[in-house]
Image (cartoon, rainbow, N blue to C red):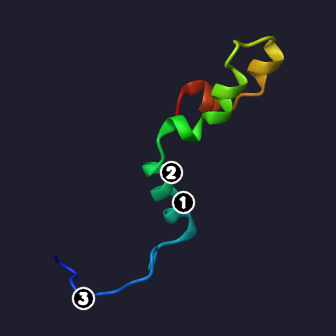
């Protein structure tokens, strides 16, 4: 182990944005988009429901 014996706080030296990006990168897309799956479980009822989705949700990002 390269840092054996070295203890650092999680996120030490990272900005809030960098920490948030690391978490996002490790979160499965199914969990990030769970609200979309719930909302669309029975299909999109109207164009209004489709309009609730963000551009990222529609793009699958």
Give left or right: position of 23 versus 7.
right
**Residue ID for mark 1:** 20
Q: Position of residue 32 (x, y in %)?
A: 57, 41
Residue at point 73%, 13% (across, down): 44
Please tell me which of labels 2 and 3 falls first in the chain.
3
Secondary structure under badge 3?
A: loop
Give left or right: position of 12 versus 33.
left
Residues at marks 3 and 1, CA–CA distance in whole angstroms = 27 Å
Q: CB under 8 Å between callouts 3 and 1?
A: no
Task: Please name which of the two marks, 2 or 3, marks the residue nearer to the observer.
Answer: 3
Q: Position of residue 21 (x, y in %)?
A: 50, 56
Q: Is residue 11 above or below residue 34?
A: below
Secondary structure under badge 2?
A: helix
Return the mark for residue 54: none
Task: Please name which of the two marks, 3 or 1, marks the residue nearer to the observer.
Answer: 3
Q: Position of residue 49 (x, y in %)?
A: 79, 20
Return the mark for residue 5: 3
**Residue ID for mark 2:** 24
**Farthest left residue?**
1
Q: Is residue 52 above or below residue 14?
A: above
């Amino acid at each position: 182990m390269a840092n054996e014996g070295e203890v650092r706080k999680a996120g030490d030296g990272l900005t809030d944005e960098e920490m948030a990006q690391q978490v996002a990168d490790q979160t499965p897309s199914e969990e990030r988009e769970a609200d979309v799956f719930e909302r669309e479980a029975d299909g999109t009822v109207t164009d209004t429901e489709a309009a609730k989705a963000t551009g990222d949700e529609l793009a699958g990002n």
